Image: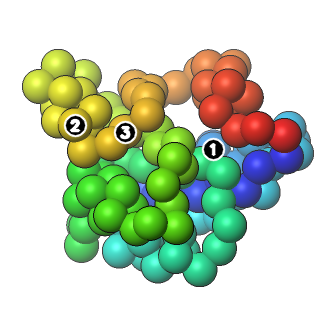
């Protein structure tokens, strides 16, 4: 299946994502902030990035902009997973290059559905 990078400053959220996606055959790589996520994205073959918005060091919008600036990652699906439901923030994320949006708390079936649509097996 896919190599999925999850970027969130909450260890429990990263664990929930891993517990949801690993049994479906995905390899989940974890990062605690946008800067760590950017480094991990540069060093490996990824099929999808799932990122939080509000994080220390580098937030999710900054991460998306940085990922979209890398020629090697053109076309990489990026999903926002956040408690933020403000339409202005959603629009900003879309402009930055986000592919999709999931609001926390998420349902496992919802996450699996989004991932299955974006990750080609």
**What residue is shown with label 1?**
17
Q: Is residue 75 above or below residue 66?
A: above
Say the numbered circle drawn on residue 98: 3
Q: Residues within 10 Å of mark 1 (few under 14, many from 20)?
A: many
> Disc 3 on helix, strand or loop?
loop
Q: Is residue 12 above or below residue 43?
A: above
Q: Position of residue 100 (x, y in %)?
A: 44, 29
Left or right, 26 with reference to 67: right
Say the numbered circle drawn on residue 55: none
Q: Earlier in the sequence, mark 1 or mark 3?
A: 1
Q: Earlier in the sequence, mark 2 or mark 1?
A: 1
> Disc 2 on helix, strand or loop?
helix
Between circles 1 and 3, the one closer to the viewer is: 3
Left or right, 62 with reference to 74: left
Q: Position of residue 106 (x, y in %)?
A: 52, 26
Q: Position of residue 70 (x, y in %)?
A: 40, 68
Image quarter of residue 21: top right
Q: Is residue 101 above or below residue 67?
A: above
Image quarter of residue 109: top right
Residue located at (25% from left, 44% from top):
96
Give how far apart the Cα atoms at labels 2 and 1 are: 25 Å
Asked whether the residues under the numbered discs 2 and 3 touch, taking CB atoms below 8 Å apart as contact, a structural biologist would say: no
In this rendering, the count of numbered labels is 3
Left or right, 75 with reference to 101: right
Between circles 2 and 1, the one closer to the viewer is: 2
**What residue is shown with label 2?**
95
Q: Residues within 10 Å of mark 2 (few under 14, many from 20)?
A: few
């Amino acid at each position: 299946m896919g190599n999925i990078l999850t970027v969130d400053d909450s260890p429990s959220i990263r664990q929930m994502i891993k517990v949801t996606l690993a049994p479906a055959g995905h390899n989940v790589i974890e990062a605690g902030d946008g800067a760590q996520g950017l480094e991990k994205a540069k060093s490996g073959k990824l099929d999808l990035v799932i990122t939080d918005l509000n994080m220390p060091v580098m937030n999710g919008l900054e991460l998306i902009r940085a990922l979209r600036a890398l020629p090697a990652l053109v076309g990489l699906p990026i999903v926002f997973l956040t408690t933020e439901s403000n339409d202005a923030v959603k629009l900003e994320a879309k402009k930055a290059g986000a592919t999709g949006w999931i609001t926390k708390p998420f349902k496992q079936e919802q996450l699996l559905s989004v991932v299955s649509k974006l990750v080609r097996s």
